[in-house]
Image (cartoon, helix red, strand yellow):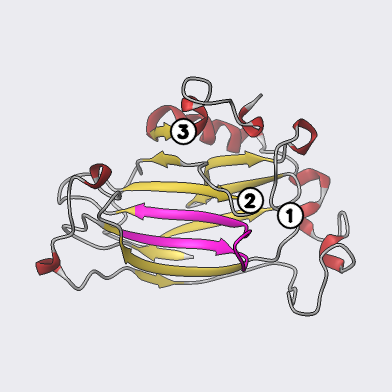
Amino acid sequence: MQVKLVEGDSAGTVTALYMASEGLNHDELDFEFLGNVSGEPYLVQTNVYVNGTGNREQRHTLWFDPTAAFHTYSFLWNRYSILFLVDEVPIRVFANKEENGAPYPKNQAMGVQGSVWNADDWATQGGRVKTNWSHAPFVSTFRGFEIDACELSPETDDIASSKCGRVGEFWWDKPRMSGLNRHKSHQLKWVRRRHLVYDYCMDSGRFFEMPRECIV
């Protein structure tokens, strides 16, 4: 999806692009763009929910002004990992570590959604900066939606028995898609070094037990 974010003072707002299944025990993949005070950088928060449980946030700054032009934000989701990409640059890899006992979203069909909403209790500087409604309306623009996926009807199809559950059935599940190539790996390292500002795995071990997916 190509997205151009709210211009000017967007404090308190969140623009979201996400994939989600239905129900309380849902799976979900999030891009959440946290509004800013004019002149401050936007933050992009990514998160992964599995069986209704999230709390797997990472936050990054961006290397461009996301309000000045459209940029492309993508998910690559397969049985090996989930990639969050910005203009084809990977900013996050959530690897499948089921062998370590870590949960991984693979058993529920997800649709794609977008929204702009008020979250001034937490979105900007931890909720210290509230939404200034005199600047409304707050507009983010979405365009250029593209999807390449296995289509599944949750009402009638079962993933395990459908073609969506067959190993290697689609290009994104081929063995060559099991990891980043050298160029993409270098891009990810650059993003983590220059733009990562929060990673829940870094809090793990200090405040609570290290999640299994964070164990290298």
> As shown in the figure, which amino acid type bears the numbered disc 1?
Lys
Instruction: Please report whichever mark, 3 or 1, sits nearer to the chain's N-terminal start.
Output: 1
Instruction: Please report whichever mark, 3 or 2, sits nearer to the chain's N-terminal start.
Output: 2
The numbered mark at residue 106 is 1
- Secondary structure of the residue carrying numbered label 2: loop
The numbered mark at residue 199 is 3
Instruction: Please report whichever mark, 1 or 2, sits nearer to the chain's N-terminal start.
Output: 2
Q: Marks 1 and 2: CB-CB under 8 Å?
A: no
Q: Does the magenta stretch include residue 19?
A: yes
Percent across and percent down for residue 21 are 62, 65
- Count residues near mark 1 (Cα–Cα under 10 Å), then give few for <14, some for 14-19, many for 20+: some
For label 2, the residue is: 50
- Count residues near mark 3 (Cα–Cα under 10 Å), then give few for <14, some for 14-19, many for 20+: some
Q: How far apart are marks 3 and 1 (CA)?
A: 23 Å
The numbered mark at residue 16 is none
Main SS, magenta residues: strand
Residue at the (75%, 79%) spot, across then down: 155
In the displayed structure, 171 sits above or below 127; it is below
Percent across and percent down for residue 138 are 23, 69
Quarter of the rendering containing residue 147: bottom right
- Secondary structure of the residue carrying numbered label 1: loop
- Count residues near mark 2 (Cα–Cα under 10 Å), then give few for <14, some for 14-19, many for 20+: many
Residue at the (56%, 68%) spot, across then down: 112
Residue at the (76%, 49%) spot, across then down: 79
Write down the region rendered in magenta.
14-33
In-image side of 185 versus 177 (left or right): left
> As shown in the figure, which amino acid type bears the numbered disc 3?
Asp
Percent across and percent down for residue 183 are 60, 35
